[in-house]
Image (spheres, grey):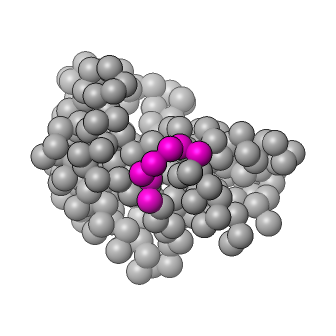
């Protein structure tokens, strides 16, 4: 049932996506399933360029929108689609919704949508819902330097953009599973498993 599935994990910074994708991967592997774990920006050449430019702050937002779309095309062609054809479960830390939520802050929703409309939807999108206050608390607890998106105002705007993005994607038939991301990671994982695996 899960063979060849493509599952994307989404949510605000601090919502626990990286933790949850790790727990999901471990659970699938414990059942003997073939799993390919990946992320966006990807580990490919365009993704590496994006990470370097995010750190340097040299490239402008309009260019980032195109770079993220180029990275997604490369990521799909090089990693995701071959793994799906081989019957693997592909788990990605961020995908289409992240572009719509984050990049629309500077480029506008319709422009970002046009850059990404050709890409196939994930089999299921796990949207981790967590209040902005709790996201910020978790970000601060990590002790790392905050990036430009990790402020209250930005997260509130991104959260609103996620709502718009989810409504539009759901209208075209995408399967979006909203998960309460509060509480211990194991409890959140149980909610993810119950919501996604039976389908």
Q: Residue extending furthest left?
A: 153
- Measured as percent of width and height from the top left, residue 17 is found at 48, 44
- Measured as percent of width and height from the top left, residue 109 is found at 24, 62
Residue 124: quarter of image: bottom right
- Measured as percent of width and height from the top left, residue 45 is found at 50, 27
Considering depth in this image, is 105 or 145 the residue closer to the camera? Answer: 145
Q: Is residue 115 above or below residue 148?
A: below
Which residue corresponds to the image point at 31% horizontal and 32% vertical from the top-left? 139
Task: For residue 77, say whether it is visible.
Answer: no
Which residue corresponds to the image point at 48% horizontal and 61% vertical from the top-left? 179
Q: Is residue 24 above or below residue 142?
A: below
Segment tinted magenta in the rendering: 180-186
Name the side, left or right, on which 86 lies relative to 187. right
Q: Is residue 163 above or below residue 28?
A: below
- Measured as percent of width and height from the top left, residue 170 is found at 43, 76
Which residue corresponds to the image point at 46% horizontal and 65% vertical from the top-left? 178
Which residue corresponds to the image point at 53% horizontal and 38% vertical from the top-left? 19
Asked whether 193 falls inside the magenta stretch, the response is: no
Name the side, left or right, on which 25 lies relative to 186. right
Q: Residue extending furthest right?
A: 32
Rendered-image quadrant of the N terminus: bottom right
Considering depth in this image, is 66 or 130 the residue closer to the camera? Answer: 130
| Picture mark count | 0
Task: For residue 3, say whether it is visible.
Answer: yes
Considering depth in this image, is 152 or 162 the residue closer to the camera? Answer: 152
Rendered-image quadrant of the C terminus: bottom right
């Amino acid at each position: 049932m899960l063979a060849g599935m493509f599952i994307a994990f989404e949510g605000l910074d601090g919502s626990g996506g990286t933790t949850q994708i790790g727990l999901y991967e471990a659970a699938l592997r414990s059942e003997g399933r073939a799993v390919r774990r990946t992320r966006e920006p990807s580990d490919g050449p365009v993704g590496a360029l994006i990470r370097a430019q995010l750190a340097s702050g040299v490239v402008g937002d309009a260019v980032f929108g195109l770079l993220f779309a180029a990275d997604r095309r490369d990521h799909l062609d090089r990693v995701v689609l071959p793994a799906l054809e081989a019957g693997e479960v592909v788990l990605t830390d961020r995908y289409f919704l992240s572009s719509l939520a984050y990049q629309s802050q500077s480029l506008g929703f319709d422009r970002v949508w046009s850059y990404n409309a050709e890409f196939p939807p994930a089999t299921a999108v796990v949207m981790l819902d967590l209040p902005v206050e709790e996201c910020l608390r978790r970000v601060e607890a990590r002790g790392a330097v905050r990036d430009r998106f990790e402020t209250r105002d930005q997260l509130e705007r991104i959260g609103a953009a996620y709502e718009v993005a989810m409504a539009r994607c759901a209208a075209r038939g995408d399967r979006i599973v909203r998960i309460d991301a509060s509480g211990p990671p194991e409890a959140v994982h149980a909610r993810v498993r119950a919501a996604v695996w039976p389908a």
